[in-house]
Amino acid sequence: MSIKTESVSLSFGNKSILKDITLEVKPKEILSIIGPNGAGKTTLLNMITGNLSDHNGEVYYDSRPLNTISIQERAYIRSVMSQFQNIAFDYSVMDIIQMGWLDHKFNMISSDLENYQNDVIEECDLQSLVNQKFNTLSGGEQRRVHFARTLLQLWQPPNANDQNYLLLDEPFSNLDMVHKLSMMRSIKKRAAAGTGILMILHDLNLAYSFSDRIIILKKGSIVKEGDVQEMLNEDLLSKAYETNIMIDQDPINIRYY
Amino acid sequence: MQALKDASNQIKTYFNFISYKQSYILCCLILVSLIFVVLAITLGSYGLSIFEFVKGNTTAIQNTVLIEIRLPRVILSALVGASLGISGAALQGLFRNPLADPGLIGVSAGAALGATLIIVLGGDLFDQYSLGIYLIPLAAVAGASLVIFMLYLMTRGFGYEGVTYMLLVGIAINAIAGVGIGILTYISTDAELRSLTFWTMGSFGGVTWPLLTPVIVMILISIMIMVPFSRQLDLLQLGEQEAYRLGIDVQRLKYTIILTCAAAVGASVALSGMIGFVGLVVPHLTRLIGGVNHNFVLPGSAIMGAAIMIIADLIARIIVQPAELPIGLITSAIGSPFFLWLIFRIKRL
């Protein structure tokens, strides 16, 4: 049970974007991918989700090759949140959140789903916003709406217990620290409940204080992968980012996580 | 009133993701359309009463006028309105662009060019075979599909960025098709081609049952295929990438919408010429009164389009009787200021 890539490579024309990537997103685990701009982090995510398919090597969802799983079924296995563009029409916040209801689910709108939806709305602090127009919200608020939608996509009927995964591209951008913290709690909660989590993060402090495992990606290759402690290495980070990075384990620091 | 409530409950259980208010609006729209149908059948340069007809108190000539002239005309106007309305709504959803309209972006023009081509070049063919009555709508559908596929290629998959670009391409296609139709009407002495005004301004006159039947079939089938894709169109608003991640076969969705819109628009243009702005105005009005989710907007635009077109045709017939105005004149008179208002409102062109 895991989402796995096996020596996956991808190039656009003769420009190589990803080289020989092998990674595994395991249940109950938070895996973060860090690395400088242009390392191919988002491209890697797009490949794992199946948005990009013209690569070498294979992506597996729970040991099944991705191309043998229907597009619809993939949506039940993994829920994705990434960067967003404008929406052309005036959908309400509730409309957007409910876009996370997958097909078989809205044929039988159970009270369980309703309850779950209400919990998610509260979790993302959206109670006062649900009736507003999505386009009038601020960037951070829109982010929380999309996060709520992504969480709704993870919903399962009470007796089902399928393995699922949450894939997040820069989930905390634009968020104030209170909402950052509560989003982190939500993610931790999902991980504890068995969901496998993959995040792309830019903030190293966040990544290190929050993940179980870390992958450093640079120029399309994995530099190193390991537990947080193992990856807490000034040389390693300095080389990866080509700048001097110091790790101060006892800082005067306003910690909110 | 109770019946209306029951009916809206029925609609609400049939369409998921439609609010009680929205199903209520749909019911009211249907009711209004039915009233318009009765009005449109009754009024005109030749006085008729549908109630007398039902009672059987009408003369033979009255029956003929009602069944052979008035009724097909009203049905055609309703269907054309429905097909333009729902196609406008679906194309706006597909392009993620509130300014898409089958007329503005050249789809109707492509259909008209296809129809005129087959009338002029296939002249012999369709005198001899009854196939001819299907050939014209099919050629129109081919023209319409060609234009939408061209737009698709030129805007690189309908990206939201390409709004201005798409409208410019539409202007060019409209101009090219206009030239083509102009030349064809000029060189053709064939009475079947009708006038240039017919193709550019539209008319519901002179329609007969044999011509109407294939169009009824094509439009109704297109609408029935389109409506179940409403939810997918909603999700597409998040972007193609997100829609795919939510389990939607985006490719299939696109081709379905393209082909059904082309079929609906092509079929209606083949019989009624180009009628502008309906596909733009109707979906916007529908969104204004009831909300933006496609489960409501698609059926709502179809019904409202039908209602508006019936009443527009009624006005065209009775305002200068016994002559009549081109229907496109009336829709454009209402639609073009609306278009201007929309451009000012949207600004992010």
Image (tube, rainbow, N blue to C red):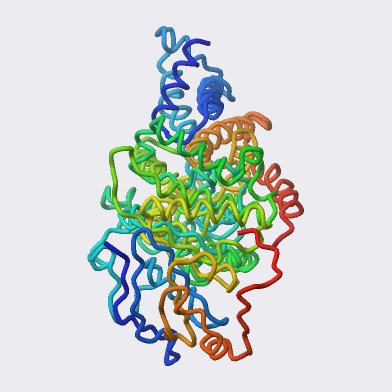
Q: Is residue B249 above or below residue B216?
A: below
Which quarter of the image is occupied by the C terminus of chain A? bottom right
Q: Is residue B109 left or right of residue B211?
A: right
- Residue at 45%, 90% in the rendered image: A15
Q: Is residue A180 left or right of residue B137?
A: right
Decide which of B238, A202 is in the foreground and name it. A202
- Residue at 55%, 51% in the rendered image: B274
Q: Is residue B250 left or right of residue B106?
A: left
Q: Is residue A8 above or below residue B175?
A: below
Residue that protrudes farthest toward the front in the picture: A250
Tell me, yes or no, if residue B70 can be seen here.
yes
Q: Position of residue A102 (x, y in %)?
A: 39, 46
Q: Is residue A61 above or below residue B194?
A: below
Q: Position of residue B268 (x, y in %)?
A: 46, 46
Q: Position of residue A37 (x, y in %)?
A: 57, 81
Task: Name the image quarter holding residue A85.
Answer: bottom right
Decide which of B323, B91 is in the foreground and name it. B91
Decide which of B271, B195 is in the foreground and name it. B271
Q: Is residue B25 above or below residue A25?
A: above
Decide which of B167, A200 is in the foreground and name it. A200
